[in-house]
Amino acid sequence: MEWLGKQREGANPREHPQALWADAKSAILIGQSYASADDAIALLQQKQNGLVSAYAARRDYHDVVKGKLKRFAQWLARETNADVKVFVDTAPLMEKPLAQRAGLGWQGKHTNLVSREHGSWLFLGAILSAAEIEPDAPEQDHCGSCRACLDVCPTNAFPAPYQLDARRCLAYLTIEHKGQIPREFREAVGNRVFGCDDCLAVCPWNKFAQTSREARLEMRDDLRLAPLSELAVLDDAAFRARFAGTPVKRTGRDRFVRNVVCAAGNSGDASLAPVVERLIGDSSPLVRGMAVWTARRLLDVGAFERLKSAQAPREGDCSVAEEWDE
């Protein structure tokens, strides 16, 4: 690990280690940098290519960080003669406020942890220990009057500093959201096909971050940015093969291709229209519905109306039918 901090159990029940494990006396928070050399904001201009969030265009951090934590936890257990438990997004543990109290950084106005050394590019993990361990000093907030992360958000997902409305967040909408992306946010998706890095990328503290030294978390350029025409034709087997061992695989082919088709609609590239037309016959309503929206944007009025006359009467899914009627 590149750095770590320690924090004893706190008073807030939602941040209390004993809420997960009755024997917990200390929480050890560990951060792994995933800072990259590329410019996430500049990549948004490559509209014919689908952009994958920096954290996901590499080997799944859950596997890498948890493996390292387990080795450290085994050493800690031997040294303290006390039981330990390891967590990397595997339990409802409030890692970010605990990490701030442990001195690793502070929760910025974008609600993510910020480090003076590593900026906003951090994976977090935790070890709960039954041993009493002397805590580090908490970190103070160093955001000051800066609003860069709030102002850059394409969907205004921050109703106030330090508050996030996940229902408007493109990271949530392109990764976790199981339904169709709401129409009001589709243009804001741009060329993002998995996640959004905007609020992280503009943080001024990133100027102190060095490219991550963890070889197993090295960025894969073929995953970070790829032609939409290539991504749109992925079936389930091809999707699984392409994204095996990465966080992208977790969202599934249908949601991913939904995002790709949305990005195609924002590309203005009429050469993608034939691929989109074929996806109107896809087995997934998520893909079909988004393909209708995109076809309307890429085809001229006459071509779209002919397509609608041929396809809309055969549509059996209500949500897709609504897209035809929009």
Image (tube, grey):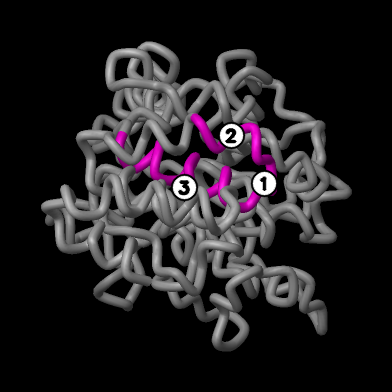
Q: What mark, if any, has residue 280 been given in the picture?
A: none
* Circle 2 SS class: helix
Where's the C terminus, which quadrant?
A: bottom left
Counting from the top left corner in percent of width and height, residue 78 is at 31, 22
149 or 307: nearer the eye? 307
Residue at (57% x, 79% y) in the render: 158
Q: Quadrant of residue 269?
A: top right
Counting from the top left corner in percent of width and height, residue 318 is at 16, 62
Under mark 1, the amino acid is Ser
The residue under label 3 is 29
The magenta segment is 254-274
Residue at (76% x, 72% y) in the render: 142
How many numbered marks have been drawn onto this rendered protein structure? Answer: 3
Res 152 visible:
yes
Res 127 visible:
no
Q: CA distance from mark 1 to mark 2?
A: 9 Å
- Does the magenta stretch mainly form a helix, a strand or a loop? helix
The residue under label 2 is 272
The residue under label 1 is 267
